[in-house]
Amino acid sequence: MTPLPEPRIAVIGPGAIGTTVAALLHDAGRTPFIAGRSARAELRLRSERGTVAVPGPVATDAGGVQPMSDLVFLAVKATQTAAAGDWLAALCGPGTVVCVLQNGVEQREQVAPLVPAGEVVPAVVWFPAVREADDAVRLLADPRLTVPDTPGGATVENALRGTRCRVEISNDFPTVAWRKLLQNAAAGLMAVTGRRSGMFARDDIGDLTLDYLAECLVIARADGARLDDDEPQRILESFRASPPDRGTSILADRDQGRPLEWDIRNGVVQRRGRALGIPTPISDVLVPLLAATSDGPG
């Protein structure tokens, strides 16, 4: 029997998450095509297992790119999705699967208009990775993704099989996505205060976090997620168990003066609450503060 050809894989956005996925694929002998805003000779991923160097170059011009890819990992920030449209148009065809490695519960709604002929697969990313001063990325925990039980989800699982990244197929993806969103929503408090995980040790911040997550939980359940009553407490305890100097991506973006993903992580709770007729008093305060922190003016 003639073996099937290896899928043509591309990664758009070699930030912390994109570099991690590209390095894990390369380490397994499936080096992807890499597209980004800045040219680089290579990507480097560090972990407790050593350093993986992914040969470049990182492509920066979508014009004339051929052939199209079977699988594209979209790893840009949600604030950069529209800017990645040229790459999606160049790399995607009728059979392309686009796996969206972004925060939130609206990946399909945000990306599908840019991929009219392919299948968009949302994913939940469960591993922290940070960029270091020399532009390498450090992987801080075992990599894991959750994708829905769809043909495209199976494509993602097959592509990453044999790598360090474990892919879980979920038949209740909305619940998993909302569980991660609640965690990310609480991390918005870090962006407003400019503080790291240690702040959650404060009793007043703990009370605020629980109240905010209770508000988010009502919206999540109304949106179809099946989350337990103790979800807010579990998330607070996970922040408190983290090293006190542990940050988060939205805090790193604030520190670097970059636009924040406040809308897909926090604004969505307020928007869906209004659409469902559910009051969101904490969101009504937190969301404008995050928007101003991100976008100004001032």
Image (cartoon, rainbow, N blue to C red):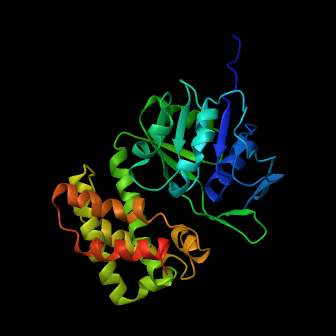
Q: Is residue 183 visible?
A: no
The location of residue 171, given as percent across then percent down, is 36, 39
Residue 94 vs residue 228, the one in the foreground = 94
Q: Is residue 20 above or below residue 254?
A: above
Residue drawn 53% across the image and 50% down it: 81
The location of residue 63, given as percent across then percent down, is 71, 36
Residue 44 vs residue 12, the one in the foreground = 12
Q: Is residue 89 left or right of residue 134?
A: left
| Quadrant position of residue 8 | top right
Q: Is residue 244 above or below residue 252?
A: below
Q: Is residue 118 visible?
A: yes
Count the numbered circles shown.
Answer: 0
Residue farthest along the top direction in this orientation:
1
Say which quadrant the N terminus sits in.
top right
Residue farthest along the left direction in this orientation:
277
Residue drawn 61% across the image and 55% down it: 17
Q: Is residue 252 left or right of residue 153?
A: right
The location of residue 286, given as percent across then percent down, is 34, 75
Residue farthest along the front direction in this orientation:
297
Q: Is residue 283 above or below residue 88?
A: below
Q: Is residue 289 left or right of residue 260?
A: left
| Quadrant position of residue 284 | bottom left
The location of residue 159, given as percent across then percent down, is 61, 35
Q: Is residue 153 above or below residue 253?
A: above
Residue drawn 59% across the image and 38% down it: 88
